[in-house]
Image: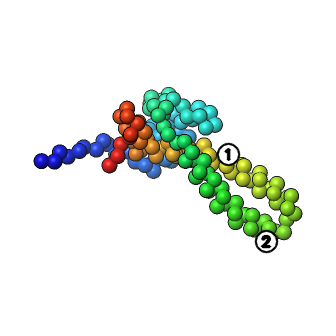
């Protein structure tokens, strides 16, 4: 006879990622998720949810580059083909825009990654100590 494995209580993904996007605790939504620009807090001061075992690693940077590249490519075309800007002016404007957009998106995408990990009980967010996380 096969034993039925009970799954832990489901955590909704979309609200957890939205809280992470706002750089808030994915559990309660009130405490700060980050203690610096990109440094993740050890735990939430409101609900005591631990964050030290999160594994966002390079994922947020890759997604940020992907998004910024897809926004900048059409702008480069428009600036060059339609506006006929001088190369130095175009490079200056686009460089500032690229850096500003990257600095804005990176901590928010990192928060969303951590929210996803929390919701899916990955990397210790499920209560296990092995780091394997919860899998279906």
The tag on residue 103 is 1
Residue 87: x and y in percent read: 85, 62
Residue labelled with disc 2: 81
Above or below, 120 against 81 in this view is above
Identify the image quadrant of residue 120. top left
Colour scheme in the image?
Answer: rainbow
Identify the secondary structure beneath mark 1: helix
Q: Residues within 10 Å of mark 1 (few under 14, many from 20)?
A: few
Proximity of marks 2 and 1: CB atoms separated by less than 8 Å: no
The tag on residue 15 is none
Q: How far apart are marks 2 and 1 (CA)?
A: 27 Å
The answer to which of marks 2 and 1 sits earlier in the sequence is 2
Q: Note whether residue 8 is visible.
A: yes
**Residue visible at 17% across and 45% down in the picture:** 3
So how many labels did they put on this image?
2
**Residue visible at 30% across and 41% down in the picture:** 8
Q: Note whether residue 29 is visible.
A: no
Name the side, left or right, on which 87 lies relative to 27. Answer: right
Identify the image quadrant of residue 58. top right
Above or below, 129 against 115 in this view is above
**Residue visible at 62% across and 33% down in the picture:** 36
Identify the secondary structure beneath mark 2: helix
Name the side, left or right, on which 84 lies relative to 52. Answer: right
């Amino acid at each position: 006879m096969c034993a039925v494995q009970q799954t832990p209580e489901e955590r909704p993904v979309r609200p957890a990622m939205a809280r992470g996007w706002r750089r808030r605790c994915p559990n309660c939504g009130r405490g700060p998720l980050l203690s610096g620009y990109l440094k993740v807090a050890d735990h939430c001061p409101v609900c005591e949810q631990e964050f030290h075992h999160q594994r966002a690693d390079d994922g947020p940077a890759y997604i940020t580059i992907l998004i910024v590249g897809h926004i900048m490519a059409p702008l480069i075309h428009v600036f060059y083909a339609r506006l006929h800007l001088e190369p130095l002016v175009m490079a200056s404007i686009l460089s500032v825009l690229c850096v500003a957009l990257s600095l804005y998106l990176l901590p928010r995408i990192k928060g969303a990654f951590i929210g996803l990990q929390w919701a899916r009980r990955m990397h210790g967010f499920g209560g296990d100590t092995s780091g394997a996380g919860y899998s279906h």
